[in-house]
Amino acid sequence: MGSVTAEILADSEEFDQVILADLNLERAKRTEKKISKDKVVVQKVDASDVDGMAKAFKGIDIILNGVIPRFNLKIMEACVKAKTHYADMAWDIAPDTTKPGQVVKETPAWNQLRMDEEWKKAGLTGMIGLGCDPGLSNIFARMGADRLDRVRKIFVRDGDNGQVEGHKFAPLWSPETLIEEVLMPATIYSDGQYRKLPAFSGKEMFEFPEPVGTLPIYNVDHEEAETLPTFIGQVLGKGCDYCDFKIALDDSYVEAIQMLGMLGLDSPNKMDVKGAKVAPRDVVAACLPDPSTLGERAKGDCAIGTITKWFKDGQEVSYYIWVQLNHQQTFKKYGHSATGYSVGTPLAIAAILFAQGKIPQKGVFPPEMLDPEPWPAMLKKYGMPVHTLEQKYY
């Protein structure tokens, strides 16, 4: 996903240098070779070393974070030290230990959002969760909310009927993130409070636009439901009574991931195995194919979008706003699976809009606080046209 972002920025007029920073220098060099642009260079950087990052970030305009979200806070700390702007694709959901049925006192998004005042005082911009979902899904919620007098419900729906040739179980994004988020209790917003539901709850059949079609979807712990009710409902004053996120999961995926959870193989904590310290989740991830190598073998279509509903001119209305991509066509045109391309592209667009002065606000904020006006045209430019369906109630 980070390589998608880098490729787009390497072709942009707004940036005269793109640095691929990675602990694995060979991986960065492979991306550098693929992009093959003079403006692209590589540098070895450790995302767990704040002082090392701060030194590396000096003189950089903006840091685009494409690593696993557990490093976000350290990267942001380094950005403050280096006085560098920042954007990421997702935030860490792991610190939240609220059990199913309990009210969430503070969503994990605030681990980063509470830095808002510090970043404002420093004159820095910190954009969080700017992938596809979260990211575009939040912006689509804002687009729908802007068209309504008042919002009652927000549904984020992620559908993908894709298959990877030669693999029965092959996530197209970080296996660690997939295992972590789908096994955790899911966050929803209801009756004025953030709450937790059991993992894999709320199964229903949802009719995604063709050719994705009707797929089973489940409540999954995801970023959108942690911020949309607060920022759409309270900060922007549109109101919000209910919000959830559901993703399409094949039955075989659900069974496999549930088994991992039952066996404790989802644990990120290291344990002794014949004298070696290993984390079970790392072992599982190591056994799965690298998502960055799967684009050519991915087949099928995805549709990611948001339904925002309630009152407009006294009538009940819903807006379904989404983007849709085909894996094979996306790989043929851009060299990436639809999953990787759809997540890496919005981060690049945010950086370009920031460089153009179209994201002037300072502080730390989620995607729904961005001006949505330039996004449809930019997404269309990069092969992700925005679709909108207005209907009388959903």
Image: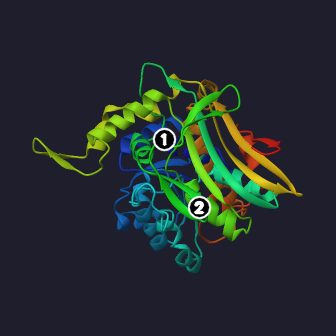
SS assignment at label 1: helix
Residue 161, position as x, y percentages in the image: 57, 27
Q: Is residue 56 visible?
A: no
Mark 2 highlights which residue? 227
* Outermost residue toward the right in this view: 313
Q: Is residue 128 left or right of residue 136?
A: left
Depth check, front residue: 187 or 74 = 187
Q: Quadrant of the C terminus?
A: top right
Tell me how the rendering is colored. Answer: rainbow
Residue 137 shown left or right of residue 223 in the figure: right
Q: Circle 1 sits on which residue?
A: 32
> In the image, is residue 238 above or below residue 285?
below
Q: Is residue 118 above or below residue 69?
A: below
Whole-percent x, y for residue 36 in the image: 54, 38
- Answer yes or no: do the residues labelled 1 and 2 have beta carbons within 8 Å? no
Q: Position of residue 169 (x, y in %)?
A: 41, 28
